[in-house]
Amino acid sequence: MARRHAVIFEEDLRIPEDAFTFEGFQRWVESEEFPTSGRIDYLGGIVEVDMSPEDLFTHGTVKTAITSKLHVLVAESEFGHVFSDTTRLASRFADLSVEPDVIVILGSSLDAGKVRLTPASRKGPDRYSGLDGAADVVVEIISDSSVKKDTQRLPPLYASAGVPELWVVDARGEDLRFDVHELRDGQYVRLDADVEGWIRSPGLGHAFRLIRRSSDRPGVWRYTLQAREV
């Protein structure tokens, strides 16, 4: 029997009726019907769709700066892996299936089974389409359309999934916000920066600070994620 659909937001975006359960959403993700653009997440029975483009200098370049530094520290050192953009992180336990801005998983967590590679069922053996379980670090960069999602709806679900460290960045205002949260007793606690702005990452063995510099063009910013061993 053909599935019924609900149409939301965009003329060509149709959400299967059975996508409002974790299993149904994951089947949709793995199907050829799943859109190749936009961010579509499943949060505890709710399907959230964001088709708006990323702002270049309050989102895109911030993500690039964070990803590039973490890649050097984690991936090039063979400490783990760093993923960005359309990498899906799912947790059946937390009723969650999302595409964070940046994900870090450590080799030790893969070995211990805390997080698993999701096989790409249509691409053959030894091919993977996402992650399942508790990533070691998740980074969310706030955009105009994701404020409540990134600050209110997602953190409790990431906590339920057991993600030990959550970074939240907001580069839209005059003051650059860079917060590192540690999971303690099932809830996130924001870690304090020192007098120079460094914040220690419990899981990565480094302290970090995010620097923003202006250019000669209005609204054009340059970002650097600085790191030092602790």
Image (cartoon, rainbow, N blue to C red):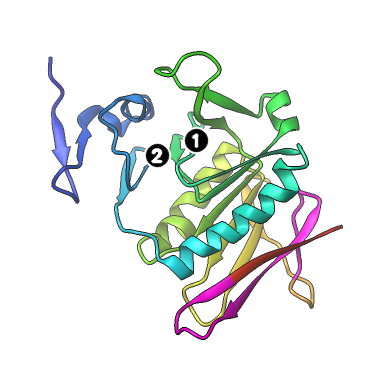
Q: Mark 2 = which residue?
A: 44
Name which residue type carries label 2: Gly
- Look at the image and tell me in which quarter the N terminus lies: top left
Residue 105 at x, y percent in the picture: 65, 38
Residue 176 at x, y percent in the picture: 57, 75
Residue at (48% x, 77% y) in the render: 220
Residue 67 at x, y percent in the picture: 60, 53
- CA–CA distance between discs 1 and 2? 7 Å
Exactly how many numbered labels are in the figure? 2
Residue at (51% x, 71% y) in the render: 171
**Magenta highlight range:** 198-222
Using the rendered image of the protein, determine whether residue 183 is visible from the camera's viewpoint. Answer: no
Name which residue type carries label 1: Ala
How many residues crowd around disc 1 within 10 Å: few (fewer than 14), some, or many (20 or more)? some
Determine whether, in the image, residue 51 is placed left or right of residue 135. left
Residue at (57% x, 26% y) in the render: 117
